[in-house]
Amino acid sequence: MLTAVEPEMHPRQHGIINADPRLYNDDLAPTVPSQRTWSTYNYIALWFSMSMEVTTYMLAASLINGGMNWKQAVFTILLGNLIVLVPMLLNAHAGTKYGIPFPVFVRASFGTRGANIPAVLRAIVACGWFGIQSWIGGQAIAQMVHILAPSTAGAEWVTWTCFLGFWLINMGVVWRGVESIRFLQSYSAPFMVVMSALLLGFMLKKAGGFGPMLSEPSRFADTSSFLKYFFPALTGMVGYWATLSLNIPDFTRYAKNQDAQIVGQAIGLPVAMTLYSFLGIACTSASAVIFGHPIWSPVELLGKFHQPLLAFLGLIALLVATLNVNIGANVVGPSNDFSNLAPKYISFRMGGLITGVLGLAIMPWKLMASSHNYLGWLVDYSGLLGPVAGIMVADYFLVRRTRLVVDDLYRRGAMYEYRNGINGAAVISLIIGIVAALAGRFIPALEPLFTMAWFVGFFLSGGLYYVMMLGHRVQHAAAAE
């Protein structure tokens, strides 16, 4: 059960002795046995509930809009999710074994103070996603208003009012606490399955069957032009869950055991993403047949329906799914990250409010202006988070062999202090990885590196970190015994 630790609990009750108040609060404390309630089903439900939402649909639709046929799009999505599943499961291990959240786990590699660097990087990206989801939810509400009051169609004030209104709903859920996430997950996934089936059936009927629906050919003239689009698209697929591949310990710290989270995630992530992505692929292909051009936004697509009841129900489904994933994927992580900056002053609730405000400041309406902007956003931030994932995996599995001294993660001057709380090896590796991954965005000759930004950052930073920490490997392993 994903709940905050009760305020009356103290460090000793979590097995932590002499915790530094600058590094500890109840939300960052290791979970106790009574909180380890998540089973395999909960993790499958988590991934289905987070995958079955608008941005997954639009992710798949952007591939069709970019020129792929349905087979190429399905293959790209499946491959991308199988790839990102690897760092997801690797980083999840520590959360289950030690009951610690991401910002505490990353102290092992970056240091007690240096951990704020990757935590803030991950949090800022999540704020962008929070803004994007809020914008999509606001648009869905606006379309519902237009259905009920056709005279409001085209009125910008309706869109902006609905956007801010949906943003406030999200803030209300954050204020009520994270227990609301489990409630949303319990009901949103089956609801989305039913509504998705109805949408697919409607588009199937309109397009005249699966034949015409999936007949949209690839628009790439040759293999070379396809690969030029495929590699950044694959990076975008991996980048889609690059944030959660870092802060997955925030969820797996509540697992009953390792098998529960490993099996649940191995089934839930690739299956849910591929199945729901197919909906976006099929409906976008069908929209090209029905309307003469592909429509990548499901909100816009539902707005074109002449059956008000179906459109209204579909938009409600989008709202439920968007609210669920926005809180589950884009609030839990950054709230813990911001709390890690000043645990004594910033609670989970306050961290969630900070996330909401920054989500507005990132101006999501610009990121969602086109499918090109959307895919570009995924590739851009994957270059920031790939290096962090590489360093975390190298540190935990290669340097420490999965052994951590949990008490020292909450203390200054202990094993993870390094130099003034910062591990120079991690910071240097991170900077080099980010520069290498993103240089191609500005230097044409290095563009191939940018198209594979996440991969470049992951392997380069992870490799550099391991080499720089070779002298410390035996020392740290012995101290953790």
Image (cartoon, rainbow, N blue to C red):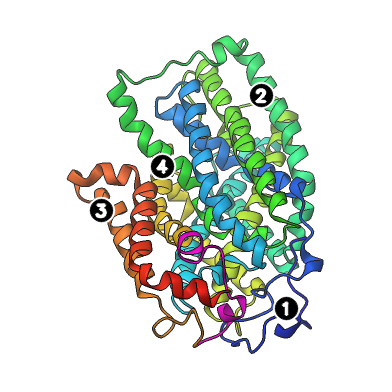
Front tag of 2 and 3: 3
Q: Residues within 10 Å of mark 2 (few under 14, many from 20)?
A: some
Q: Earlier in the sequence, mark 1 or mark 4?
A: 1
N-terminal label among 4 and 3 = 4
**In the structure shown, which secondary structural element does the residue marked by tag 4 occupy?**
helix
The span from disc 4 to disc 2 (Cα, nearest Å) is 28 Å
Q: Does the residue at mark 3 contact the one at mark 1 (Cβ under 8 Å)?
A: no
Instruction: Name the image quarter holding the N terminus.
Output: bottom right
- The local crowd at label 1, few if under 14, some if 14 to 19, many if 20 or more residues have their Cα within 10 Å, is some
Q: Is residue 257 left or right of residue 357?
A: right
Q: Residue 419 colored magenta? A: no
For numbered disc 3, what is the local secondary structure?
A: helix
Residue 235's disc number: 4
Identify the residue position indicated by label 1 in the image: 14
Which residue has dot 2 on it?
200
Q: Residue at x 38, y 47 (%)?
A: 455
Query: Dot 1 lies on which element?
Result: helix
Circle 4 crowding by C-alpha within 10 Å: few under 14, some 14–19, many from 20: many
On whether residue 405 falls in the magenta region, the answer is yes
Compare marks 1 and 2 and give the one earlier in the sequence: 1
State the residue position of label 3: 439
* Residue type (three-letter) at the residue carrying disc 2: Leu
Q: Please state if 117 lies on the left or on the right of 207 as rendered.
A: left
Q: Give the alpha-carbon distance from disc 3 to disc 1, as whole Å.
A: 44 Å
Give how far apart the Cα atoms at labels 4 and 3 are.
15 Å
Mark 1 and mark 2 residues within 8 Å of each other at the beta carbon: no
The picture places residue 393, in percent across and down from the top left corner, at: 48, 58
Residue interval drawn in magenta: 395-412
Residue nearest the observer in this picture, 18 or 436: 18
Task: Say if 204 sits above or below 56 in the image.
Answer: above
| Most distant residue in the left direction | 445
Q: Residue at x 40, y 75 (%)?
A: 423
